[in-house]
Amino acid sequence: MKLRRIFLTVGGAVVMAATLPFATAASAAPAATAAHASRPAAGISIVPLAQCPIVPHRFVTYRKGCVKIKGHLCTPGNHGDRTPPLYASNGCSYRVWLYPEKGEKGHPTLCIRPHSATGKFQRFWLSFRVTLSKKAC
């Protein structure tokens, strides 16, 4: 059976990857029953993608693997334009929003929850803002 790699993205950031069996018409398996619906099918492997370190009390953007570009203070209202990072980590107690255009413009936007890190971005994020919210996105 052939395997196919799929990616789960949120706002352009890859957050998980999975390797799933790829069924052809000749090898299609019967549908899962309700009793087995809550368990992963045999052969499925879900793995988190690489993440860069979370630096306490800083929003950090990374380029070329996990080489730090710049750390930003977690002060609510802190904002700025960035060279497009490949990864980001939020060591703040507040949400950080990323924008696809400079000057906090454009859609879609990406929220990075407090004390978390992203997988590799699949699009450019050119500006950010630290907000007052401490809730998960």
Image (tube, grey):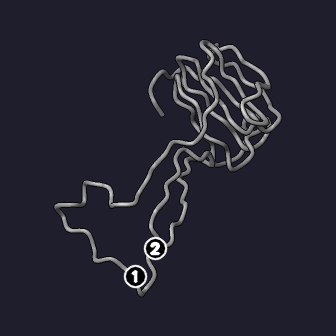
Q: Percent x, y for residue 96?
A: 60, 28
Q: Quadrant of residue 44?
A: bottom left
Front one among 96 and 28: 28
Question: Relative to 95, does residue 49 appear above or below in the rendering?
Answer: below
Disc 1 target residue? 27
Checking the image for residue 81, the label placed there is none
Position of residue 9 in the picture relative to residue 102 (left or right)? left
Q: Name the residue at 64% across, 13% down.
A: 75
Q: Position of residue 124 (x, y in %)?
A: 75, 45
Q: Is the residue 9 above or below the residue 101 in the image?
A: below
Q: Nearer the viewer, residue 126 or 9?
A: 9
Residue drawn at (58%, 19%) of the image: 91
Return the residue at label 2.
Answer: 1
Mark 1: which secondary structure?
A: loop
Three-letter amino acid code at disc 1? Ser
Badge 2: few (under 14), some or many (20 or more) residues near its Cα, within 10 Å?
A: few
Task: Please give left or right for residue 7 compared with residue 98 in the image.
Answer: left
List x then y, in percent, for residue 60: 69, 23
SS type, badge 2 = loop
Q: Earlier in the sequence, mark 1 or mark 2?
A: 2
